[in-house]
Image (cartoon, helix red, strand yellow):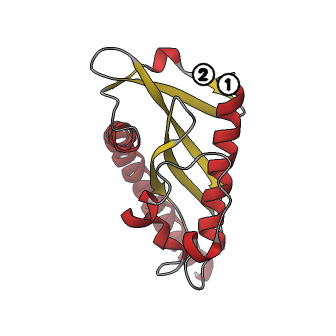
Amino acid sequence: MERNRFIHFGSVLLIIAAISAGLLAGVNGMTKGTIEQNNINAENNARILVLPIAKTFDEAQIIEKDDFKFIPGFNENGEKVGYVVTVVQGGYGGNINFSLGVDLEGKITGLKVMNHQETPGLGAKITGEEWQKLWIGRDKDYEFNKSVDAFAGATISPSSVHAGIVRVLSTYAEVTK
């Protein structure tokens, strides 16, 4: 009698788990395309934010080097004005994903943190618009300054962003030789 009870409850639990898994798979299938499109739209919006002088971007002319994809941006006359690149850099709480705009002289035209797992209220301040604007006009030779570029109690997140910027701009200098 006791054994039948375990089989009964085990079977009920198995049926509930199978139905739940099927529902989750169905919902995932229905929303997968929308999520992908939202990610593409967010990336395109970030491109325009970090390279505002560009009106169009041509993914057919991507330059790939050292895990970076430099996507050229063009102004309304079809002239190349710079590149955008997506950066993944390890931070304090996990990876920091950001888009970086670079003009033809190797200077930063914009920075937009897209995703991070940094500490709320501390490292998460890297998403602040004012802090991101600090980087505009800087190049690969800029040295990180704790008193200007970091926050009280959080130096790892901002210095990680700086490390990612230096990696990109150093690679950019090699690509544009």
| Residue located 31% across and 40% down the image | 34
Q: Residue at x 49, y 66 (%)?
A: 126
> Which circle's residue, 1 or 2, is located before the other in the chain?
2
Residue 32: name its quadrant: top left
- Label 1 SS: helix
* Left or right of 47 in this view: 34: left
For the residue pair 27 and 35, the one nearer the viewer reads as: 35
| Residue position marked by numbered label 2 in the rendering | 63
Tell which of 123 and 170 is nearer to you.
170
Q: Is residue 147 above or below residue 134?
A: below
The image shows residue 10 at horizontal and vertical percentages of 55, 69
* Label 2 Cα crowd, 10 Å radius (few <14 / some 14-19 / many 20+): some
Q: CA distance from mark 1 to mark 2?
A: 8 Å
Give me the residue at 27% from left, 20% from top: 76
* Quadrant location of the N terminus in the rendered image: bottom right
Residue 66 x, y percent position in the rendering? 72, 33
Left or right of residue 174, residue 71 in this image: left
User: Do we see residue 84 in this rendering?
Assistant: yes
174 shown above or below 116: above
* Amino acid type, callout 2: Ile
Name the amino acid, label 1: Val
Mark 2 residue element: strand
Is any atom of residue 128 visible in this view? no
Q: Position of residue 130 (x, y in %)?
A: 39, 65
Judge left or right: residue 24 versus residue 85. left
- Mark 1 highlights which residue? 175
- Residue in the picture at 55% in, 32% down: 105
Q: Is residue 50 above or below residue 83?
A: below
